[in-house]
Every structure is written in structure tokens, then in C-alpha cells.
Image: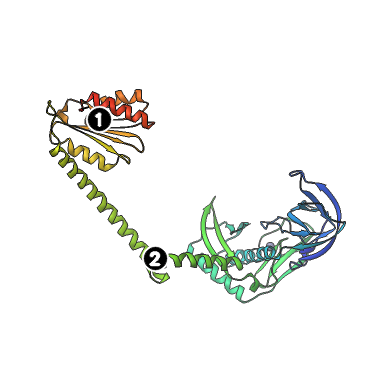
Amino acid sequence: MTERLYYHDSYLIEFRARVVAVSPDAVSADRQRVYLDRTAFYPTSGGQPFDIGELGGVKVLEVVDEGERIAHLMADALPGTEVDGRIDLDRRFDHMQQHTGQHLLSAVLVELFDAPTVSFHLGAEICTIDVAATLEPEQLREAERRANEIVFENRPVTISFEDSSGDLGLRKPTEREGSVRIVSIESLDRSACGGTHVRATGEIGPILIRKLDRIRGNLRIEFLCGGRSIARARADFDALSKIARVFSAPLDETPALVDGQRDKLRESERMRRRLSAELAQASGRALYGETIPGPDGVRRVLRHLEASLSEESRAEAQSFTVAGPAIFLAVAATPPAVLLAVSKDSGVNCGEVLKRLLGPAGGRGGGNATLAQGSLPSQTSLEELAESLSRELNFPA
Ligand SMILES: [Zn+2]
């Protein structure tokens, strides 16, 4: 059975221990599972991830709770049977801040809104708790304010071991039998927990509530504590400052400015579409005027487009074919496509002609008697189709 040094002192980052067993790791052959008589390394458990660091100068990759024993997954063999352990303090202290912050936030949510926490996740970037309650953003702001108030009061956070037979007065009942490790925040919370915590609420640092999500009937609350809050606030400020610089405006005015810009952009887009349509119609009319009819009295035009077919192509085609006998054929390069439009008195059925010629070319599409459109699988098939359409519709060679 491994003695868990972190149970009594979360700030212990250097220790000496004896190696009691070594076994190959089942998952990865180049890793070893090392067991010590005592360890300050925290194994993944209760929503809190494992510590990293070194044992005898060798990197600890992962720490696993096997119940009675704790396994240290090592990158290499240890130099001896007595080793010095050293824990990565930055990672450990970050976990202590987030974890203690979670106790505090969960307790405040019960205190204010009777909203119990059902699960906790401490991720590499963010932390979340799932709460079995429906809370409004306004209430979460109130919880954030209250939680930070208790941080400022710097209340002691203490560890005790108590027998489960008595009434422990815990926020959430425990199923553990015998001696139970209890983490207390003075005059606020008592929780059964095996994790690592700071010694006073002031060390949690600022608590910042962020995103809210509805997950399977619960409310998932994203939050950050201490160093993470500062890093996040810094990143938020930098991002907002960039936006504010674009507007040459104070930070607090940017939401209204962004709103205004979005409305203007929508209006501009509406205007652009209208003008494009008008331009395309005018272009179709002009084209009709300057095209000399063939011997059969039908005006024919063949358009080669570099880009794709668009709403404007269709408007130009319809405008060209509305005034008298006319045939409009557009061939677009990217993606390969054709557009065929005819006047009612042209003697041609667009949909029928295109459908008949598209099939053998491997293309797809269709339309009605006066307007049809098709897409082709390649440039070569497009050129072949354009040629057969020109022949079929008596375009001059
Ligand atoms: Zn805890």
C-alpha cells in the first residue's frame, strides 16, 4: 500500500522514497510502472489530473491510482532503489487553485440557489462543473461575485480525517467507510475529497465564470481560477484591443460599433445584389441590341466566363432572350458548367436539349423550356458539350 504524502501536505514537492516494485507497462513497452513505499505524486482521480515531475532524475509521464497502490509511469529505468522525487510545482499549484476554487464555487451555488454539483472536470485549459439546476446568467454573476468575496476574506482551508459513522455534515454524502478525508472551507463547506488544495481561499486567486451550456438536463458551467483567470483576461483584453484599434474607439464601445457595422454590411450587400441584377439586365439588353440576327432571324450569343455561373449570368441571359427570337449560351470554367437560355419563339426547348447532351458528357443538370443549367465533370467534357451545343443550336462556326 502506497503512503500518500499529498493527503497531509499539498505543498510537499520534494520527497525521498524507496522503490518497492517495478513492472513493465501493459500499454507501452518502453514505459515502466514504478511503485514506491510513499509518494507525493497525485494520481488522476476525482476530476483532478495527475502530477508530473521526476523520480531519481527520470521523467514521470503519468501517475495512476490502482486502489491500494499508486503507479508511476516512467520514461526510463530508475538509477537505484532509493530515489528523490520532485513534482512540477507550476502544474500542481495550478491544479490546487482550480480544485479548491471548484469546492468554493460548488458550495456557493448551494448556499445561494440550492444548486448541487453533480460532476467536475479539470482540463488543461478550462474547468467545468455540471450542476443539476436551471440558473440564469444573472444568478451565475451573483455566484461569481459571492465566490470572489470569500476569496478576499482569505478563509482557512483545512484537512481532517473523521470517522464515517458520525454525522459528518458534508455538502454531498460520501459512500466511504471508516476514516474519511474531509476538506473544509471555514464556515462554508465540508467535502469528502482526496485531492490537493490550497491552505486559504486567498490563494485560489480570482474566480471567473465563463460559458454556460445545457448538457443532458444539467447546466455545465465553465470557470477559471487564479493564474488561469489572469491569463484568460489578458488574452481577452488583447483580442478586444485589436478590434478596438480597427475602430479607433474605446474598448467598451466596440460591441455597439460591431453591431452597427454588421447592419451596414447587410444593407450594402442588399444594395450590391440589386445593382448587380440591374447591371446584368442592362448588359443583356445591350447585348441583344448589338447582336446581328442569323438568316433565321434568331440572335445567338456565346459567353465564356472565367469564374462560375451566378445569379447575374442568369439575369443577363433572361434579359437577352426576352425581347425577340434569341439563344444565349454561357460556358463557365470553374467549376465547369453551362447555362442555356432561349426566347419562347426560338423553336428550341432548353431543358430537353441540355438533358439529351449532358448525359453522354457525364454531366448533371436540367431546367425548363426557356432556361436550363448543367455541371460537367471536367474541362474536356465541358469543351465537348459546348461544341455539340453550338452545332445543335446553329451557332456560326
Ligand atoms: Zn477537493
- The amino acid type found where label 1 is placed reads Asn
* Disc 1 to disc 2: CB gap under 8 Å: no
Q: Which of the marked residues, 1 or 2, is nearer the chain's N terminus?
A: 2
The residue under the point 24% across, 28% down is 350
Label 2, secondary structure: give it: helix
Whole-percent x and y of residue 88?
Answer: 71, 63
| For residue 203, side relative to residue 87 (left or right) | left
Of residue 119 and residue 12, the one placed in the foreground of this image is 12
Quadrant holding the C terminus: top left
Q: Position of residue 11 (x, y in %)?
A: 74, 68
Q: Is residue 276 above or below residue 356?
A: below
* Residue linked to disc 1: 368
Residue 38 appears anywhere in the view: yes
Residue type marked 2? Val
Q: Residue at x 26, y 40 (%)?
A: 313
Of 86 and 179, which appears nearest the observer? 86
Mark 1 and mark 2: span between their CA atoms? 49 Å
- Residue on which disc 2 sits: 246
Would you place residue 277 above or below residue 295 in this image?
Answer: below
